[in-house]
Image (tube, rainbow, N blue to C red):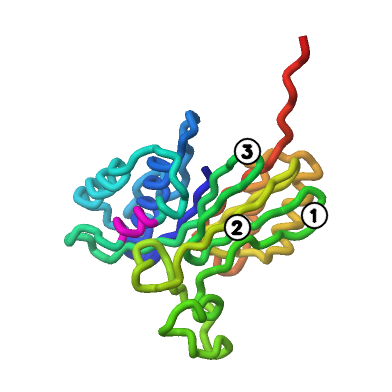
Amino acid sequence: MLVVSGGTGGHGTGWLGARLTVRGLLARGSTSAAEARFVGAADGVPDLARWAGGVARAADIEYEKHAADSGDRAARELASLFADIDRELAGPPKHSPASLMAGCTATRLDGARVLGAHVGIGRALLFRAGADHFENLVVEHYMHLVGDRTPQFRDIDPAQIPLNIMVNGLGALATSGVGIDRFAVELGAGDLLLLCSQRLDIPDEEAARIARTALDDGVPLHELARAIERRAAMTPSPSDVAFAIALARPIEAPPSR
């Protein structure tokens, strides 16, 4: 599984929604024997010195443990797992300092086929072997892009809607009406999959150039990730976007006897 999540209200408890989402999905949905690797808020509770308002009270952590442990590891559909997480974020304990909501894009590999689920403003980008541009596999759940799915926004002219209004996330599926998007794609050798919690701080075209150069030069994936991260940090107002990348490689046949 490959999962990215971005919580809303990062000044308060946005990190907790994202952490619950990632850890809950991996706890219930991963059937791999490999140990999961976490980064960001999913890896460790935020340091109060770095996260304004990110108060991690003991009760919140106990709620997190309960949510992560309340499912099984059956190979369930990602959308079904999303629905579980949605119910938990929609009904946090009364002591929680704010409501919890998180966007999430998650994928699971079935042979060479990628099966995915998406809610929120994240993205799933496919970079085919030999290509010079990304293919976008999902629609961001901004009001001007998906407002026609909901009765309350259907009659609003998209041209009159600001471009940064998020209208869907786990914890708010019942009220948004937008739902869970599913996607599927076949991977070939050399194809790159990039998931991000929101748009990268650099244009897609620039990210594609960085990726193409790295892949052509045989640069390891972690170095490609660092290159994108360094370039994004040079932008005027870098965000806290999270991203994950995976590269499809051919399976080498075992030596014949």
Q: Nearer the viewer, residue 147 or 121?
A: 147
Q: Secondary structure at mark 1?
A: loop
Q: Residues within 10 Å of mark 1 (few under 14, many from 20)?
A: few
| Relative horizontal placement of residue 19, taking residue 180 as reference (left or right) | left
Residue 253 lies within the magenta run: no
Q: Nearer the viewer, residue 176 or 40?
A: 176
Residue 80: x and y in percent read: 41, 52
Q: Secondary structure at mark 3?
A: loop
Residue at 76%, 57% in the rendered image? 209
Which amino acid does the dot numbered 2 rest on?
Answer: Ala
Residue span colored magenta: 83-89
- Residue 111 is labelled as 3
Residue 65: x and y in percent read: 27, 43
Residue 110: x and y in percent read: 59, 41
Q: Which residue is mark 2?
A: 124
Residue 216 picture quarter:
top right
| Relative horizontal placement of residue 247, taking residue 104 as reference (left or right) | right
Q: Which residue is mark 1?
A: 131
Which amino acid does the dot numbered 3 rest on?
Answer: Gly
Residue at 59%, 63% in the rendered image? 138
| N-term-proximal mark, 1 vs 2 | 2
Mark nearer the viewer, 1 or 3: 3
Which amino acid does the dot numbered 1 rest on?
Answer: Ala
